[in-house]
Image: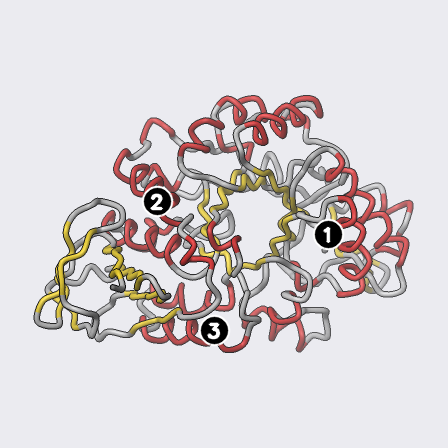
Amino acid sequence: MNTYRNQFIYQVFVRNYSEEGTFNALTKDLDRIKALGTDILYLLPIHPIGIKERKGIYGSPYAIRDYKGISEDLGTLDDFKTLVKATHDKGMKIMLDVVFHHTAPDHPWVKKHPEFYHWKDGHLTNKIGDWTDIADFEFENNPKLIELLTDALLYWVKLGVDGFRFDVAPMIPEAFYKVAFPKLKAVNPNLITLAESVDPWFLTFLRYEGYTCLSDSEVFNYFDMEYDYDNQVEFLGYLKGEKTLEELRARYRLQELIYPKNYVKARNVENHDNARIRFYTQSYDKTMNWLGYVFFAKGIAFLHFGVETGTNHLSRLFEKDPVDWTKLDPEMVKWIQGLAKMKKDPIFAQDDHYRVVSHTKDILHFEYDNKDEIRVGIFNVGDEKGVINTKLPEGIYTHCITGEPVEIRHGVISLTNRPIIFSIPKR
């Protein structure tokens, strides 16, 4: 059993969460975030952003020049402390984004500790060509670097931060995790750790070039949970019409074979690096079914702020581009709330008796089974019509979210344009 699978992460970019783009504005909206069913509030990096080689007007929050500082446009340290306390008071935890693979090129360490960095032909550089606004660390033979980074994490933990999401976690060597994580757990044994793992293409490229890149299985030695990017090629391929849904289903099944039985994947269909799911589907109905998948598939649910407005516009990372909250979609909010409440059911935390069921139609179908029930989730991501065949027991059951009847008759279930989620009691 892994109770992270009963939880829900809500990802926020403070700058673009509101017109004000501040901690205080976010604090004022915590009741709405909590009402969605959020367990963990995850903030993109909040630190001062580099000036040198800056992208856009505001710059990327992933080009950091002070790991213990706060970007002035977001507010003060006291404002952040108020946000942390208010988040805790509402029964949620707060997680910060950690960017330990690189810094901004004008981080003070570049001059004070040039040995920390990756150099080529005498020039400060990075390993990934389009990441032009950052300078990469070189961890090998740099215990002082590991010490200072660990100290930065301890600083935030002592301020009440409950966990960290690590940017490109596989590119940080195991030597760091072996030193840092025991020290962090000594201060907070319940510290939450989420790894942004990478897709297979990126891992292959980095290893070919001779750079550090841990596999998902290696990452699970240290982290509580990690991104679902090992499926990213198939997921985006399906959305773009380049791959079949069965190829994606095969990836879900593979996860059951190659990871520890208590593995936790952050199931998400959009985040700050990827286009909105509505952009790909161009369909309200398909989008609703993908949101159902996020909460039902084995793992922790993960939503990117603003998805509940039904928007197809991903806010720009380097500019001021707030979400239009006047477009909040009542039906979508109601479904998210219902799904988050359902996610608390113990059956979603179990390690075994989980199936991915195939159909000839573009339907995602998952089942959990225990001594009390079979929990069924059917997600019409292809906007298919008609019926699907099933070997489930015939009968009339109750939809877990809407309360409407779900009927299995003559070995078929009628499809709808919304997720179909129900429980078959075992008598």
Residue 32: image x %, image y %? 42, 29
Q: Which mark is residue 393?
A: none
Tell me the residue at 47%/58% (across/down): 349
Q: Amino acid at mark 3?
A: Glu
Q: Amino acid at mark 1?
A: Phe
Image quadrant where one finds the C terminus: bottom left
Residue 235: image x %, image y %? 40, 65
Question: Is disc 2 in contact with disc 3, using a CB cutoff of under 8 Å?
Answer: no
Q: Which mark is residue 312?
A: 2
Which numbered disc flags the more N-terminal residue, 3 or 1? 1
Q: Residues within 10 Å of mark 2 (few under 14, many from 20)?
A: some
* Camera-side residue of 211 and 27: 27
Alpha carbon separation for disc pair 2 and 3: 32 Å
Q: Which residue is mark 3?
A: 256
The residue most toward the left is 410
Which-is-in-front pick, marks 1 and 2? 1
Alpha carbon separation for disc pair 1 and 2: 31 Å
Q: Residues within 10 Å of mark 1 (few under 14, many from 20)?
A: many
Alpha carbon separation for disc pair 3 and 1: 30 Å
Vertical side of 146 occupied by 11: above or below? above
* Camera-side residue of 226 and 2: 2
- Secondary structure found at label 2: loop
Tell me the residue at 46%/33% (across/down): 34
Q: State whether residue 403 appears in this view.
A: yes
Vertical side of 283 occupied by 207: above or below? below
Residue 155: image x %, image y %? 78, 38
The image quarter containing residue 366 is: bottom left
Residue 337: image x %, image y %? 35, 39
Q: Which residue is mark 1?
A: 100
Q: Amino acid at mark 2?
A: Asn
Tell me the residue at 52%/54% (across/down): 3
- Secondary structure found at label 3: helix
